Amino acid sequence: MSSSPAQPIFEPISRDLIDPVYPDNPTKSSIEKHRPIRRDLEALKPEEFDPRVPYGWGFFIYRAIFGDGTDARFSEGLKRLEKWLRWEARISRYNSDEEGGSWEHHPEYMPAAGEPDVTDEVAARMWNEVVEEYPDAQEIITEPEGSEDFSPIGRDFAARVESFDINTGPQDEEDRRRNTRYETCLIIDGRVLDMLEGLPADTPPVVPLPESSPESQEAEQILRDNWVWILDRETAIDREEGDVQEFPPWIRIRLHSLRFFFFRSALGYVTTDWQRLVEEDKNNWDTVRWWNTIAPMCNEIRRASRAASSNAVALF
């Protein structure tokens, strides 16, 4: 069962959103056209990309904490999560690496604080589908750390997506786009809920600030330090079928990576090999794993360092 609010009906994505034209200002037209956020909207533009939720983006979010008093807590934690994800999309008009270069050279074209912007469109088109009731939910294991087992969620997610009978992957051999809503889902358990409850109830104002300012640093740390579980559907299916895998289907993903992950997958820029996206934590090797696009390189370096340290100890 899903407890999500009624699905919003998003308007089709107009050409002006992807390719804005300012007849009297060709420089501004060029800068606005090449903003990365417009490529994100272009990924959502085809209705066939997601016939269930056309012109929108977001995730399935599974509840994995139950018991007295958790209903209100889960609702509030989810509210804060979505509020910060929408803020992260809006503030990207000023702080994304690619956009920062444009504004540095053409500050006169930077969107003014409070002025409607394409990032508002992306924020408004996020809709998450929340699942609170599903088979075997009470069998989930969430602690101690490192013993997590979200298999019931993997099974329900796989069955749910199969029931939709839609093409969630590449449309043809040369099209690498994936619809992240149906390839991965997010999970909120007790550990995650504690963090979400700790998120500030109010997000900072959407205004341009120096990257080194205390306000920018604090907001970035909030998005970097807080995370949710993310589960890959195909990996969960393979695990159920007995395939031996190096890493489990569920790992951690930081809040500041969620929008990036969705749209980079939608545009075909992220590998579909889940095992190549799992980074072992440098301090907790056997229990904590993170989503990272350069995970293989990080793991190789850290494993070599760990082996060198072990060899050095063995010599004494």
Image: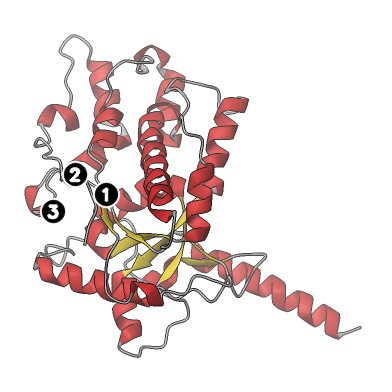
C-alpha gap between disc 2 and disc 1: 10 Å
Residues packed near mark 3 inside 10 Å, few (<14), some (14 to 19) or many (20 plus):
some
- The amino acid beneath tag 3 is Asp
Say whether disc 2 or disc 1 marks the residue closer to the N-terminus: 2
Q: Quadrant of residue 146?
A: bottom right
Earlier along the polypeptide chain: callout 2 or callout 3? 3
Residue occupying the far front of the picture? 68
Residue 202 drawn above or below residue 171? above
Q: Which mark is residue 50?
A: 3
The answer to whether the residues at label 2 and label 1 have Cβ atoms under 8 Å apart is no
152 relative to 24 in the view: left or right = right
N-terminal of the two: label 1 or label 3? 3
Q: Which residue is mark 1?
A: 128
- Which residue is under mark 2? 56
In terms of secondary structure, where does tag 1 sit? loop
Figure disc tally: 3
Q: Residue furthest top?
A: 24
Image coords of residue 188 (percent x, y): 41, 58
Which amino acid type is shown beneath numbered disc 2?
A: Gly
